[in-house]
Amino acid sequence: MTTALLQKILYAEDEPDIQEIAKIALEDVGGFTVKHCMNGKEVLAMLRDFEPDLFLLDVMMPEMDGPMVLKELRKIPRFMHTPVIFMTAKIQAAELDEYKKLGVLDIIKKPFDPMLLANMLRASWNKVK
Amino acid sequence: MMESNNEANEKLARLKKNYHDNLSNKIAENATLLQRLLENWNADDVVLLHRKMHSLHGSATIYGYPEIGQFAATVEVFLKDLLNIVNPSIDQKNHLTDLMNSLQNLVMKAVSDKTSFEVADDNHQKSSLNKIVYFLEADKAWANQVIVQVEVFGYQVRYFDNSSSFIEAIEQSYPVALLIDMNLLNEELESRLHEIQENIHYKNTAVFFIATHGEFSLRLKAVQLGGQAFFIKNFLIEDLIAKLDRSFESNSENCRILIVDDEQDVADYHSAILTLANMTTRIITDARDIDLAMNEFKPNLILMDLYMPGCSGMQLANIIRQQSTYESIPIMFLSSEEDRLIQLTAMKLGADDFVAKSSRPDYLVMAIRNRVNRYHTLRSMMVRDNLTGLYNHSFIHQQLDSQLNLATRTNTCLCVVMIDLDDFKKINDMHGHQVGDQVLRSLSLMMRTRLRSSDIVGRYGGEEFLIILPNTLLKSASFLIDELRVQFSKLVFSLSTASFQTTFSAGIAGYPEYDTTSELIQAADKKLYQSKNTGKNRVSF
């Protein structure tokens, strides 16, 4: 079950430069409430205090990458159905299929457009609504 | 919404500036890391360097340095193979050193080139903010082929394989174009397309249709649904790009309006109205600033107060019309004047239209938009070369004159590039003129999309092109053109019988070294022949 409006996003990206741009894209342009994590482990640790409507995860992060986080999330009853979107610079057909099998809602290609990122997330979000 | 976006834009600009300022530090850190690694090869440092390249790959691209991002990606891939090697060979180490050196050069170039930051920024804005295409097509494999080719020309494509997700997407934002396979039309989509024609937000969104055949009933339907172009599978990609470019160029985001009014408040008011309609404005309150504003801002239309102290609007219009470059630019007068006779006199002197100062804002916007659109069409017939869509010989000459004037006045530099396709006659002889034309068109498209928005490109003769690079040093110019040369040489032309690749040679000359147009052209031409005589497929300067 998802609520009608997308408000809270948990966003994981290890590269500070990209994080900063995304922060503006999500908070200033998009008006979302956003918690940022530097890697997959932080994401899982954050879940005790924060219940996001959607996860936005960089695919390639040190220690625990996007797909691994997704697998972990699906084991937690509270987040079993929370939509997950991946961000990646490399989109190859094989990987894409693999991610889709994991149950990812959408894949956003890097570089993303900071002025349009929020709209893209909303568009994906409306697919589950 | 408007305001928060402006604020976000400002924040983004600051971020980009910081990133630009920190790039050289990043590269210095990488150099230290590489040094350490070469002295004492160890797994930790390889992992670290690999990560740094991955980061640079992602961040450079998003901050508007795609060439750095791409190169970092190459290094990233190479390092990935080294991750599992305990003791790499000398060759591998040397190759890594070469890669890192080239990367460093690229970065230093971007940092030292004063204009690079703004240019990269400009390109980024231009390419990613507006150049988005929504593509609805059932045949995934074919769609992919189209997407790959369209993205080469700087468009971002969002692909949909069914009409319901497509409908949802077009409710979210307003891309530059919708490309729709007519096989996927259904009642809901059709009614949505009817609505779009009425919706002001979609004013700048072009609708194109694709069909498997060109039967009249289909064509009629496409027109009824607001289609501005109709393509039959398998159409030529360059036709699609040409249509996309035209629709992108006539976007109101590209409406640059120069407002001339001695009263700042009045000018501000009109500027606010036009800015809200996504147009770009510049204000001058002193008629004497007109020359500089025309040259720098390159307006598509001038909105002018009829009565100003010192120089009336009509006199100013006359001055503007005397310069051949601006002979046809639309001039609109704002006046409280009701007298038809005065209006007609003004029209005779070169005014195109009158708008009452008391006009409703939406009327003003519409009148201006119509004028600008008509001007675009007319002008493109006058100054463009039919085959390539580039500026024609006489217009590029005119442009060089005025750009050189501007450079002299503002004490900036400028480069002129002559480009000539290598062995073009052979291509024509071997594959026919149609294929030759396709090569010319492809190079033209590549130049238009890969060069910076401030650069001016013209077809000088048969297979000869002239590029003006304002505010560019010889060294930066050579870098830019060499990159273009490499990209072009990679382009594969596929025919049913064969496929081939081809190259060009280039020569560059710069101001202030040469300070008249004819000297500049001669010198660039001489350098071009030097390239030809020393083996072709190269850039001399």
Image: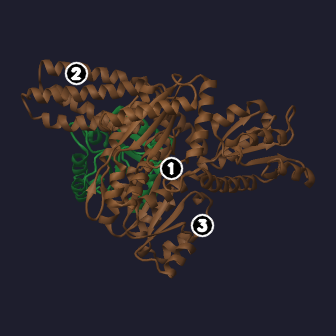
Tell which of B468 and A28 is nearer to you: B468
Q: Amino acid at mark 1?
A: Asn
Image quadrant of residue B237?
bottom left
Distance Cα–Cα, label 1 vs label 3: 19 Å
Q: Which chain is green?
A: A
Q: At 34% across and 43% down in the image, what residue appears?
A: B487
Residue B461 lies, with reference to residue B92, above or below; the image says: below
Residue with the mark numbered 2: B33
Mark 2 vs 3, N-terminal side: 2
Please give left or right for residue B109 compared with residue A97 in the image. Answer: right
Q: Amino acid at mark 2?
A: Leu
Same chain for the residues under marks 1 and 3 in the image: yes
What x and y, as percent, mark residue B441? 43, 53
* Crowdedness near tag 2: few (<14), some (14–19) or many (≥20) residues, C-alpha within 10 Å: some
Residue with the mark numbered 3: B197
Residue with the mark numbered 1: B130
Q: Chain of mark 3?
A: B
Distance Cα–Cα, label 2 vs label 3: 58 Å
Residue A128 visible in this rendered orientation of the protein: no
Q: Chain of mark 2?
A: B
Q: Are marks 1 and 2 in contact (CB under 8 Å)?
A: no
Tell which of A5 and B514 is nearer to you: B514
* Kind of element beneath mark 2: helix
